[in-house]
Image: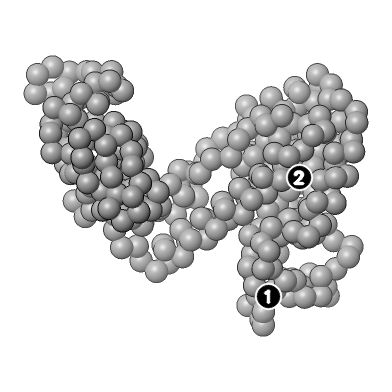
């Protein structure tokens, strides 16, 4: 049972929208691409977990706190036997593991954070959290290397590493669990879901202003600004993707809300933000259908 699905973080979405509407500096662009690649790897892993047939509870992308320390779990699976904790890495290319120093390198010698340390930290903090709420379950953690073009030289056999070629066997073994979950397992899953938090302290978002962002409706498929309004639809001239005007406008409004949460939604500003829709009446009608109207006359806004 999928109890907590995965979705893009506010940080990733914000950077995604900004990368389309402004030129990000090199470091911000690199951070965005790193988050994007990590999310894509996690979604690949989700395909595997979605095929599980044993009685289990799946929680993705948990952000938890213990003793004022925040930690993230990419994927957590609760079975009758134990809790499985997965740190998913979408590394690509050649890497080296130094068993003596317990360090990771991008070949030939660029050191990176050891994913084992991240896993061990999560295991320790999660165990403390479970004990705090009176849960006692055995736990097993693993680092999953999900990319099909990843190679780890000097890979140890005594470390909890799972490579893409090993996933089928691992999930076959997991599916062999025949014992059903108890109410205690379900209670654990619900508790972890309720403890999930959104912590914005570590977001790396560059400064931006409304005036400097490119305006217009972007294509939901290819993200280009080659969108033209024809009757009741928006059509992308770059890839041919079609969308109703209402859906295109509301999708663009959601971008505006995330980027400028402090600004009120008005027909005037949304028309300027969308640009492609020339009719103020059309914008007003769409907003009225999807939001509650507040204010009066010239001061009408939507919430």
Mark seen at residue 94? 1
**Residue 273 pos. (x, y %):** 21, 42
Above or below, comparing residue 104 to residue 253 in the picture: below
Q: Nearer the viewer, mark 1 or mark 2?
A: 1
- Give me the residue at 45% from left, 43% from top: 10
**Looking at the image, do the residues carrying marks 1 and 2 touch, with CB atoms under 8 Å apart?**
no
72, 38: nearer the viewer: 38
Dot 1 crowding, Cα within 10 Å, few <14, some 14–19, many 20+: some
- Give me the residue at 51% from left, 44% from top: 8
Asked whether residue 119 appears in the rendered view, the answer is yes
Above or below, comparing residue 64 to residue 142 in the picture: above
| Residue closest to the far bottom | 108
The secondary element bearing badge 1 is classed as: strand
| Residue closest to the far left | 298
Q: Quadrant of residue 127?
A: top right
211 with respect to 248 (left or right): left
- Give me the residue at 9% from left, 19% from top: 297
The answer for how far apart the CA atoms under marks 1 and 2 are is: 25 Å
């Amino acid at each position: 049972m999928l109890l907590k699905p995965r979705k893009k973080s506010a940080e990733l979405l914000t950077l995604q929208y900004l990368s389309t509407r402004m030129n990000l500096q090199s470091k911000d662009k690199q951070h965005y691409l790193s988050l994007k690649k990590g999310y894509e790897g996690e979604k690949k892993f989700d395909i595997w977990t979605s095929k599980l047939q044993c009685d289990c509870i799946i929680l993705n992308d948990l952000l938890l706190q213990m003793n004022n320390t925040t930690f993230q779990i990419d994927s957590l699976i609760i079975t009758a036997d134990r809790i499985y904790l997965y740190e998913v890495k979408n590394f690509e290319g050649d890497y080296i593991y130094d068993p003596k120093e317990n360090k990771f390198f991008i070949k030939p010698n660029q050191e990176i954070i050891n994913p084992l340390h991240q896993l061990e930290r999560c295991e320790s903090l999660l165990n403390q959290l479970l004990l705090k709420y009176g849960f006692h379950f055995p736990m097993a953690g693993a680092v999953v290397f999900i990319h099909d073009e990843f190679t780890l030289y000097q890979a140890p056999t005594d470390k909890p590493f799972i490579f893409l070629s090993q996933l089928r066997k691992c999930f076959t073994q997991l599916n062999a669990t025949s014992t059903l979950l108890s109410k205690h397992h379900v209670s654990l899953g619900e508790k972890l879901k309720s403890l999930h938090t959104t912590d914005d302290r570590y977001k790396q978002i560059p400064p931006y202003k409304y005036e400097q962002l490119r305006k217009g409706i972007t294509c939901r498929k290819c993200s280009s600004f080659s969108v033209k309004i024809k009757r009741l639809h928006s059509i992308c001239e770059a890839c041919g993707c079609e969308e109703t005007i209402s859906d295109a406008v509301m999708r663009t409004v959601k971008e505006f809300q995330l980027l400028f949460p402090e600004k009120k939604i008005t027909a005037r500003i949304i028309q300027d933000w969308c640009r492609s829709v020339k009719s103020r009446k059309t914008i007003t009608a769409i907003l009225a259908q999807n939001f509650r109207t507040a204010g009066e006359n010239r001061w009408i806004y939507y919430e």
